Amino acid sequence: MSDLHTLSVATLAERLRSKQVSAVEVAIRFLARTGGNPHNAFLDIDSEVTLAQARASDAKLANGTAGPLEGVPVAHKDVFVTRDFATTAGSKILKDYRSPFDATVVQRLRAAGMVSLGKLNCDEFAMGSSNENSAYGAVTNPWDATRVPGGSSGGSAAAVAAGLTPAATGTDTGGSIRQPAAFCGITGIKPTYGRASRYGMIAYASSLDQAGPMARSAEDCALLLSAMCGPDLDRDATSLDVPVENFSAKLGNSLAGVRVGIPKEFFGDGLASDVRSAIDAALSQLQALGAQLVPISLPRTELSIPVYYIIAPAEASSNLSRFDGVKFGHRTQDHTDLVSMYKKTRAEGFGEEVKRRIMTGAYVLSHGYYDAYYLQAQKIRRMIADDFQRAFAECDVIAGPVAPTVAWTLGHNANDPLADYLADIFTLPASLAGLPGMSLPVGFGQAGMPVGMQLIGNYLQEAQLLNVAHQYQMNTDFHLQQPAGVSNS
Ligand code: GLN
């Protein structure tokens, strides 16, 4: 079965259940593919751990206690803490750090039967849009190794696109699942804030951070999302007390009469024409499937950039204060007293972008500036959420681009961090409102790079997003296309 690495999660699960292949065989196949670390996608691999999990899965498959995804491989973004692999969050400050426990999401996917292939590269503490902020080097895009995979879940997106794993976890604070999924031609969903537990997910901006699956199709994402979500009330104070749904069971609905809102602010001058044509074609396809396109407005779309880049750094400056050389990770060798130990440890351990955000965050929270920046941003955040509720009075889902352009070349924004911030414009609004959002591949643009379409739903409407994406994917084949060389490698 040389095609194992091109199979969907759904098909792999079925072949494992029907004993056409064993979990150990599947694990060996994927471990072989990760050898040499293509695209620099992985930060930690341990074949002993993976094979031990696979053997345990085979035992369960044999004795009838198998979970729904038993034996199917997954790999985790390196911001989820894991007992069996190192966890660095892409930062030098956590080099070689090992957690004494597994994040809830990691633990739930294992309980569903998934076998972990290791940890995936990402921007340091999930701050970034290109994966170039990782202390362990950039990830390259499997469609064109001179381009970025997107970020911050760049390792996750590249690994799925390159057939190094059938599925991965990601986290999305301001777009980090949707944008890399779009740049690498895969499917990813960020659920409603509170659906997935943040326990054991290293915090960047706690009021925005949310975990989600990245895989080739909506069908695969539905399988993982059902397994990883659900209340975790004792361990995450923002966990929603809402039972998890069987998202896979809700993929069969026709699009007839579904109202798809098209926000005019998502189709302005900043949108590259290649991305626009692919999105327009996808919207026509939705129409052909019975959906009705409804013009809507999200008037504060542009404001989402300053609002996000005040709130997220503010929360980050607070969250990252725990990395001080005392409790976790790196401690400087070179200090004279406690204060110099703190200062040097943080100066040595954090990268440039993380330092920039800690400083911005500390500034906007400081006495005298708090009202002008942080409080003001919170007020506009509420208005952005209200704008969505007005829009959802007229439509069932919202559709538009994920990013203004296809993946840019490595180093392109190296001297211009603001350029990366501005490119987050279409993913930030749903994050600020806490709404579910997803990305699905809908074509190719400039230089043959994938284009992703974004779907945004109202609170807890993940099933509807996944259904729209699935109906589209049943009638198109963009999600089945792979970078050159993947299928026959
Ligand atoms: N690009 C955004 C940032 O740099 C989003 C990152 C994310 O969602 N983790 O903050």
Image: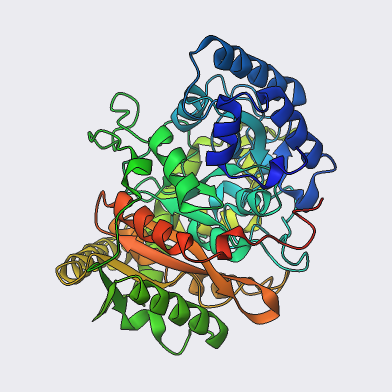
* Furthest-right residue in this view: 36
The picture quadrant where one finds residue 226 is: top left
Disc tally is: 0
The correct choice, above or below, for 195 with respect to 270 in the image is above
Question: How far from the left and from the top, in percent, is residue 133?
Answer: 65, 56
Q: Nearer the viewer, residue 381 or 313?
A: 381
Question: How far from the left and from the top, in percent, is residue 407?
Answer: 63, 70
Visible residue check, residue 328: no
* Furthest-bottom residue in this view: 269
* Furthest-top residue in this view: 63
Relative horizontal placement of residue 160, taking residue 101 as reference (left or right): right
The picture quadrant where one finds residue 257 is: bottom left
The correct choice, above or below, for 15 with respect to 429 in the image is above
The correct choice, above or below, for 442 with respect to 200 in the image is below
Q: Nearer the viewer, residue 397 or 83?
A: 397
Question: How far from the left and from the top, in percent, is residue 380?
Answer: 25, 68
Relative horizontal placement of residue 69, taking residue 292 as reference (left or right): right
Residue for point 42% across, 66% down = 454
Residue for point 62% across, 74% down = 416
